Image (cartoon, rainbow, N blue to C red):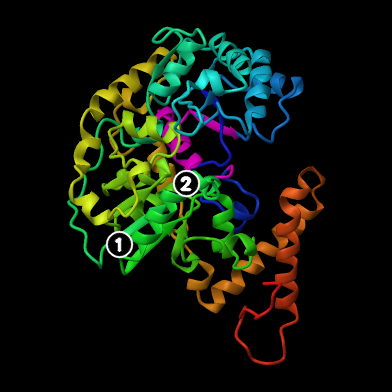
Amino acid sequence: MKILMRGTVNPLTAPNTAKFIIENRTGGNICNMLFTHSVAEALMYSDDVEIDYVNTAKKKLDRYYADYVNDTYDCFVLPLANTFKVQGHEEMVSLADFIKMLKIPCHIIGVGIQRTLTGDKFIDTYPYNDEVKQFVSAVLNKSPLIGVKGEITSDYLSDLGFKPEKDFTVIGCPSMYLYGEKLPKVKALKLNGDSVVAFNSKVEFETRKGYAPVIDFLKSNMAEFKNPVYVAQQIDDIRMLYLDRYKRKRRDNKFYDIDKAVSFVDIHSWIDFFKDVNLSVGSRIHGNIAAVLAGTPALAIPYDRRVYEIADYHNIPIIDYKALDGASLTDIAEKTDFTTVNRGHGERFSHYLDFLHKLGLDTIYDHSYADGTPYDKLIAEQEFCGVIKAYGACGEAEQLERYRDAFPIVKKLQSDESIRGEELSAEIEELKAEIAQLKNPPKKKRGLFKKKNTDEE
């Protein structure tokens, strides 16, 4: 069995940290690793199952590649995120055309909409309804059923004329089924000033006026704890952590202390990190799901429909972002039942498994293993890098090593015509300046990477 899966990184391989960050191997957001990993694990039921990955946002999806895929693979699996959105809808259009050229089964295992929480129907405000119809119809010609993330997406597809339980079914997010029918038991919570609280935020919303209550709530409550930590998920934030001056102007506008932030390039390190955290809170759904998978209490602050529908479906506790003014996280946590996430999980997983069976897919849950699944064995062979600390929290040796690792990757990017352009040009120039400073350090002893007091910085 050979599967082609949409994804930007192979979760079975411990990534090179510098390459992962500089080349944006996460597809913009590390949450993409979480649901891709879960689907891959479920489908790797035998040593004979091979899974290859393709970044459909960057790959040229033409007739030649379609012929190759038809000749090479048994099915095309698409674990998707917020595909029904305004920015980035072009990938959906190209995928629809590509799927029409395929002769193998094509399965969507999770898809949702991206829109802020307003009273308007999505079908009335979304400008690409026809494109969604073409995309969904193309998939349904190659698959018996589509799995969607929640009831809001379900309502939208119903409004477009597709039939629930015939054309699609609500499965939630596959990341929640990483451990099958059982979730880790939620740890008891009693917050105090020494508690380790992990905060997260949606970077793309931080400049929106309506998002201000979320920022104010996170910022004010960070100040209440001695050990707050910001978990960066978006690639720009992660680059700022890894290389101090990357996107420096954007860094200076952040509401959190970057030196107290962390991130990850693999989900194993991400989940392990949360085992030592007391509480996770923020507007990133997968930042909170990673906590749930570690047995850590999590509070979601939905600011868009996708976050809301996933949290709602999986019973992850929710805070209304419109009621955050002056709110105390400690007070909210004391009144919250974090065990709701475990209720009904077995039934939701059973429905998910039934969905996979309707697609004709075999899974690890249909077999018994004496010494671990094939996926478990491959993971055990890898050494993952752990927590990526902020540049300012590292010693000078590690700071220097990061720039040395980054330099050859940037040089390659600079010579690659296919990705040269505005997206990377500013980052490349900043990194070149850093390398130049390393090669020609000032004669005065002033400490590695000590910042100058100039208007340019």
Question: What's the residue at 48%, 27% (across, down)?
Answer: 112
Which residues fall within the magenta stretch? Answer: 27-53
How many numbered marks have been drawn onto this rendered protein structure? 2
Would you say residue 30 is visible in this rendering? Answer: no
Which badge, 1 or 2, comes first in the chain's sequence? 1
Badge 2 is on which residue?
A: 211
Question: Does residue 296 lie above or below 430 as drawn?
Answer: above
Q: In this view, does 253 lie above or below 433?
A: above
Quadrant of the rendering where the C terminus is positioned: bottom right
Percent across and percent down for residue 314 are 31, 32
SS under mark 1? strand
Q: How far apart are marks 1 and 2 (CA)?
A: 25 Å
One can see residue 173 in this view: yes
Residue at the bottom extreme of this rendering: 444
Q: Which of marks 1 and 2 is in front?
A: 2
On residue 437, the disc is: none
Q: Residue 196 carries which label?
A: 1
Marks 1/2 in contact by CB < 8 Å: the verdict is no
